[in-house]
Image (spheres, rainbow, N blue to C red):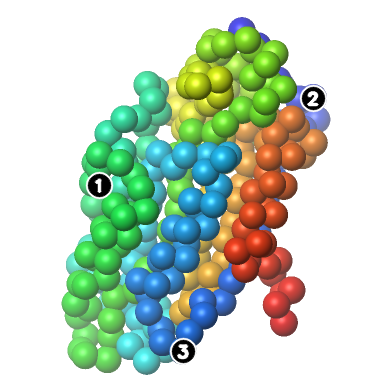
Amino acid sequence: MAQDAVSPAMLGRLTEVLTLEQVAPGEEDDPSAFAALAVDAVERMAALLRPLAVEVTFACADRVSTYPRATPTPPRRVLLLVPEDLPDGVEPESVYTDALRQDVTELDRATVLGAVDGLLEQECPGGDDLMTTWVDLLVTATEVRLPDATTARLGGAGELTLAAGAGTVTAPVAARDGVAWVAGPRPARATQAPVEVAVRNEAGLLTLTVATRWSLWAWDGAGAEDLRAVEAGLRAAGWVGVGEAG
């Protein structure tokens, strides 16, 4: 069993947050187009992570401004998409009791956007001046690639112990084509994924947050360089730091 824990002083302070934003181009307020930008951003992280659960929340919005309202709500307000090929021990769950869960063959771009577009067609109660929009697109379970140096040290599949939250998590390592991965959350060991992604939609102003939950990708961990590469790719696609665009 390999161990990449950090000092006790760092436990509970592991989250490293990367926050970027993008204003959706074009003059039309189109929640479907906004969702495509969000999903494309997640796909740009493919060298680092593979989504194992995507949760999308929906709200009723003013048809002109597309800003969401607290009430009323669409009939289906939470969608949870989960691929059928989950790694053993990974159990994505929604905090919403009314979440609509769909198990899908593959959690790819077309599948996610097709499911989102389907729920965007819901009619909002309260009149024709309201429409359905999405508010948050969350990647709450992930399989994350280990840094090359960590993979070389492991020498193959096994287990890896990392700091997570206020404790540690021991996760099996999956090796494919010379690349090693770990996945979460693992409810019996860690309630959060190694890396989580959130995109919030405020009428086309998209705010993307990448949060590291396991120590290998936090602070000056071995995976910090991979996180910086993700940031560079997102910036190349038009995402900027909060406040930089103005």
Q: Nearer the viewer, residue 177 or 71?
A: 177
Q: Residue 239, how many percent across, how many down?
A: 63, 66
Q: Quadrant of residue 227?
A: top right
Image quarter hosting the N terminus: top right
From the viewer's perspective, tell me whether residue 238 is left or right of residue 77. right
Asked if the residue at tag 1 contacts the one at tag 2, i.e. Cβ–Cβ closer than 8 Å, the answer is no
Q: Nearer the viewer, mark 2 or mark 3?
A: 3
From the viewer's perspective, tell me whether residue 76 is left or right of residue 136. left
Instruction: Tell me the CA gap for discs 2 and 1.
Output: 39 Å
Picture disc at residue 27: 3
Q: Quadrant of residue 16?
A: top right
In the image, farthest residue toward the top: 1
Q: Residue, x 52% and y 80% (percent of image)?
A: 25
From the viewer's perspective, tell me whether residue 180 is left or right of residue 131. right
Q: Residue, x 58% and y 39% (percent of image)?
A: 48
Q: Earlier in the sequence, mark 2 or mark 1?
A: 2
